[in-house]
Image (spheres, rainbow, N blue to C red):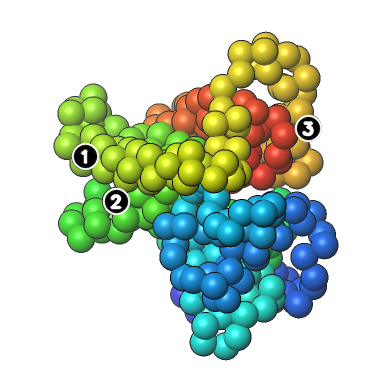
Amino acid sequence: MNTALVRIALAAAIFLGFLTRAATFQTPLFDFHAWRQADTATIARNFVRDRFNPLAPEIDARGSRKDGSVETGLELMAVLAALAGRVVGFSAHLGRLISALSFPLAALLLYRFARDRYGEAVGLVVAWIYAFGLPLSLFMDRAFMNESLLALLSIISLRAAQRYLAGRRIALVALLAATTVAGLVKPPYLVIWGAIAGMFVERDGRRAFVRWEIWAGLALNLLAIGLWFHHARAIFDQNGLTFGLSNKMFNVQTLMTPHYYQLIYSQLSRDLLGPVVLVAALYGTVHAFADRRWAELGGLAGYAVHLAVVTEGNLNHNYYKLPIV
C-alpha cells in the first residue's frame, strides 16, 4: 500500500476518533453510568482538596465518619485527574478529557499490533473500527471512569508482548508494568494473559507453558493485587466503606440462569460490538481456528473465564464486559 495514503488514513481515524470523544468533554456527569462517574470524580476532587494519597481514596458518602477512605481498586483515573487538577485547577471535565486523550495512543498501538499480525490493510480497518465501530467503547472513551485507561493498558500489554517476542527485550518491562497496573485497577482485566499466552504458543508451541516470562508476570500481577486488596480490606474493616469488591464475583445461580446468557448476547450485539462487528468477530474466530491463531483463541478463552467467574459484575454492569473489545 502507498505509505503516504496509509499515514493519511491512519491519522484521519485517530484525529476524527479523538474529536468525536473530546467534543462533549464539558458535558456534566449526568449521562450513562453517572453514579460511577460521580464516584471517580469525587475521589479525584478529594485528592486535590483534602489529601493526595492514592492508597486511601476518599468518598463523600461517609455518613458521620471523618475518614471517607473506601475499599476499592487503584483509582487510576482519579489519580491522573487529581494530578492535572493540581496544575490547572480541578474540574469534572478533566476526567472526560483524560479518557479522550487515551484514545490516540491506544488506536496507534492497536494499529501497529494488527499491522504486524495481519498486514497494513487490516491494521487500518482495525483502527477505523476502534475509532467508530464499538458503541460502548466510544462512550467510555469520554467517561470519567477507569475503563478507557484499562483499554489502553490492555493494548499496551498486547503490543509489548508482540515486541518482546520479536526480540525487543525491554518490551518485557512494559508488559509487566501494564498488566500489573491493570490488575490493580480491575483484576478481571488480567484475562489479557490468555491472548499473551497464545502469542507465546504461536512461537514456541507447548514449550510456551514452561516459559518463565508468563509465570513470572502472573506472579508479579497476583502479588501486587494481593498486597493492594489486603490493604483495601483493612480500610473496610476500619470504617466499613466499600465499592463492593467481593459481590461482583462468582454466583452459581446466576451462571445457571438462561437470562444471564441472553443478557450477554444482547449486550455484545448491541452495546459492545454492534451487529456488524459481532458478525466480523465470529468470522475472525472461525479463521483463527483454521489458521491456529492462538492469541485470538487464547483471548476468547480468557474472556469465557471472565464471564464465568465475574458473574455478578457482568450481570449488573455492561461495562464489565468490555475486555472482549
Is label 1 in a helix, a strand or a loop? helix
Callout 2, which amino acid? Leu
Label 3–label 1 contact, CB within 8 A: no
Whether residue 154 can be seen here: no
Of residues 68 and 313, which is closer to you in this image? 68
Q: Residue at x 48, y 39 (%)?
A: 237
**Depicted 83 relative to depicted 121: above or below:** below
Q: CA distance from mark 2 to mark 3?
A: 34 Å
- Asked if the residue at tag 1 contacts the one at tag 2, i.e. Cβ–Cβ closer than 8 Å, the answer is yes
Viewer-side residue, 13 vs 309: 309
Q: How many C-alpha atoms fall within 10 Å of the one at disc 3: few (<14), some, or many (≥20)?
A: some
Tell me what residue is drawn at x 49 percent, y 67 percent: 79
Residue tagged by mark 3? 266
Residue marked by disc 2:
176
Residue 35 location in percent, x, y?
75, 53
Residue 258 percent coordinates (x, y):
75, 15
Picture quadrant where residue 103 is located: bottom right
Q: Amino acid at mark 1?
A: Ala
Could you say which disc has been placed on residue 216 in the image? 1
**Mark 2 / mark 1, whichever is N-terminal:** 2
